[in-house]
């Protein structure tokens, strides 16, 4: 399968899995382990899991398919997932700040657009062949794992910041 098709499949996977993760915690009977990857409240931080975890998981399948040939595979994934999450944060706070309230329809559209940004950026960065440094791959993976650990640590022990309030 071509890299372009992988990114299209990734878009579908992230949107579907992210949507399912939105409801997984409640469906699981509020299972603590499920809460590490699914939303446990309506905070913006918790909703970023809907992009991060499916994107992170899908990246393993991509790595096995074509990523081993890319020196900067996980750095590209880090940048694209991070930019997607930043897009969601900026989009949500911008529109809800202007309106003074939030609407689920707009939230869902921002999520879908954020996933699109993630996959398009990832595809474009691979097409650009930006790095010949194999250590970029390791650094990108370590930083993705660090973000994963932050989601785990701050799920039940959130920081005293607005992004964690839900």
Image (cartoon, helix red, strand yellow):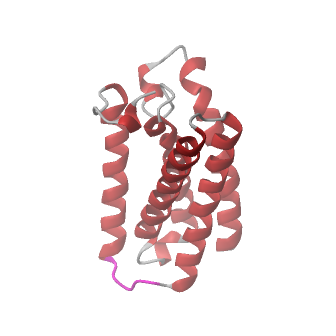
Q: Is residue 34 left or right of residue 107?
A: left
Residue 10: x, y in percent?
64, 57
Q: Nearer the viewer, residue 45 or 19?
A: 45
Residue in the picture at 52% in, 77% down: 125
Numbered-mark total: 0
Residue in the picture at 55% in, 69% down: 122
Q: Nearer the viewer, residue 1 or 120?
A: 120
Placement of 77 over or under 69, stated as above or below = above
Residue 35: x, y in percent?
45, 27
Is 90 contained in the magenta span? no
The answer to whether one can see residue 1 in this image is no
- Position of the N terminus, as image quadrant, is bottom right
The answer to whether one can see residue 69 in this image is yes
Residue 113 figure quarter: bottom right
Residue 62: x, y in percent?
56, 63
Residue 69: x, y in percent?
49, 77
Placement of 32 over or under 109, stated as above or below = above
**Is the magenta region chiefly helix, strand or loop?**
loop
Q: Nearer the viewer, residue 89 or 142?
A: 89
Residue in the picture at 36% in, 60% down: 141
Magenta-colored span: 130-134
């Amino acid at each position: 399968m071509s890299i372009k098709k992988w990114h299209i499949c990734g878009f579908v996977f992230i949107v579907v899995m992210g949507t399912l993760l939105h409801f997984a915690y409640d469906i699981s009977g509020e299972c603590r382990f499920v809460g590490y990857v699914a939303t446990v409240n309506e905070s913006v931080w918790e909703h970023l899991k809907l992009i991060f975890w499916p994107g992170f998981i899908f990246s393993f399948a991509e790595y096995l398919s074509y990523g081993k040939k890319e020196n900067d595979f996980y750095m590209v994934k880090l940048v694209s997932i991070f930019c997607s999450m930043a897009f969601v944060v900026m989009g949500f706070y911008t529109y809800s700040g202007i309106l003074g309230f939030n609407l689920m329809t707009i939230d869902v559209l921002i999520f879908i657009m954020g996933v699109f940004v993630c996959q398009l950026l990832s595809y474009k960065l691979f097409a650009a062949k930006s790095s010949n440094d194999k250590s970029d791959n390791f650094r990108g993976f370590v930083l993705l794992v660090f973000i994963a650990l932050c989601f785990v640590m701050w799920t039940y022990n959130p920081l005293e910041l607005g992004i964690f309030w839900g």
